[in-house]
Amino acid sequence: MQITNSFADNQSYRLGTTITEHLLLCQDQCPDASGQFTRLLSELIISAKLISREVNKAGLVDILGGTGDINVQGEKVQKLDDFANQAIIWRMERSGLLCAMSSEENADVIEVPDNMPKGGYVIAFDPLDGSSNVDANASIGTIFSIHRKLDKEGCGSMDNFLRYGYEQVAAGYFLYGSSTMLVYTAGKGVHGFTLDPSVGEFLLSHQNITMPERGKIYSINEGYTEYWDERTRAVVNYFKSSKNDRGKPYTARYIGAMVADFHRNLLYGGIYMYPADSQDPHKPNGKLRLLCEAAPLAFIAEQAGGAATDGTQRILDIKAKELHERVPLYIGCKADVEKAMEILQEK
């Protein structure tokens, strides 16, 4: 499903519109819409409400800290990570809308059980990005990417997931911070909704989000400077310098949860960077997963007028080779991303 440009001019599209009303209006604008995507996003929203509820109780119930397990990424699993992952899987496999899933927390494709109804979509998701920040009460989020199942492939086929980023039907994230937000795109613009706890509904709060051509914030973990090559250091020094194209240094802001850093830059303008760690044998391509982190946020960035690259090519033009493939990422305002790529490619 895609939203037509005329939808943005619809007088019904205004502050106070619920996410359900928004989706139904989108559906009315698409003659070939079956309603399945609307139902799928509605199921994701229920999952996010459950996660948001637990996030808001962190510190009051036994949901903080680790489980003692290590996930497929070699990272310690937080209790809230595990809850979020199970909540999404439980809702999605019973929705009748999915064929299979891929989670950052699971090594393999998660097939919908044979005793459950199946649909024509597959979803890749990071159940809780930034979960290491939970104990400090910092913003965290859920990222998702939706593709249509390939007609000639079975549900468990890896080919359903190893796709180009530009093939995404929709992508988005839920941000759990001072408020809970949903930001998503279905291919025609980016829209944001904020959860109103008094009515239990996501209400339109940010319509047609657009990034400025050039930002004023750079986000990167400079504690890893010694792992970077000279060109990566040159990129960071450009944004710190008063001799850049902006004419004054960019402000450094780094939360440590990519979804939170990206969200701030989406609204205010800036660039987020997680480069390859050339001297770190554990992260030669950086830390971020292509399918459940880089590609969905790249889709959102481009729909908002921004850009995303791995330093040599557009993120959405990369076809995944592995389920948990990692890529370097430079994402944000178009002029900033283009400048970073220009410096990275200098001979």
Image (spheres, helix red, strand yellow):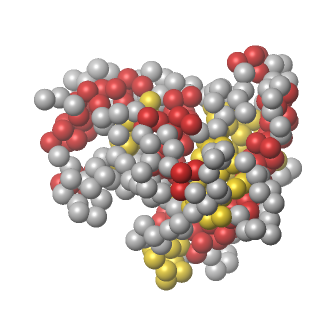
View extreme (bottom): residue: 68
In the image, taking residue 53 as reference, residue 183 lies left or right, namely left
Residue 170 drawn at (x, y percent)? 64, 39
View extreme (front): residue: 152
Q: Residue at x 80, y 65 (%)?
A: 116
Quadrant position of residue 154: bottom right
- Report whether residue 59 is seen: no
Quadrant position of residue 7: top right
- Report whether residue 38 is seen: yes
Q: Residue at x 53, y 77 (%)?
A: 65
Residue 146 drawn at (x, y percent)? 63, 46
In the image, taking residue 323 as reference, residue 2 lies left or right, namely right
- In this rendered view, identify the residue nearer to me: 37 or 304: 37
As drawn, 169 above or below 287: above
As drawn, 130 above or below 58: above
Q: Residue at x 30, y 59 (%)?
A: 283
Residue 94 drawn at (x, y percent)? 79, 63
Q: Residue at x 39, y 53 (%)?
A: 326
Quadrant location of the C terminus in the rendered image: top left
Residue 175 drawn at (x, y percent)? 61, 50
In the image, taking residue 217 as reference, residue 92 lies left or right, namely right
Quadrant location of the N terminus in the rendered image: top right
Number of numbered labels in the structure image: 0
- In this rendered view, identify the residue nearer to me: 218 or 80: 80
In the image, taking residue 218 as reference, residue 208 lies left or right, namely right
- In this rendered view, identify the residue nearer to me: 280 or 210: 280
- In this rendered view, identify the residue nearer to me: 289 or 48: 289
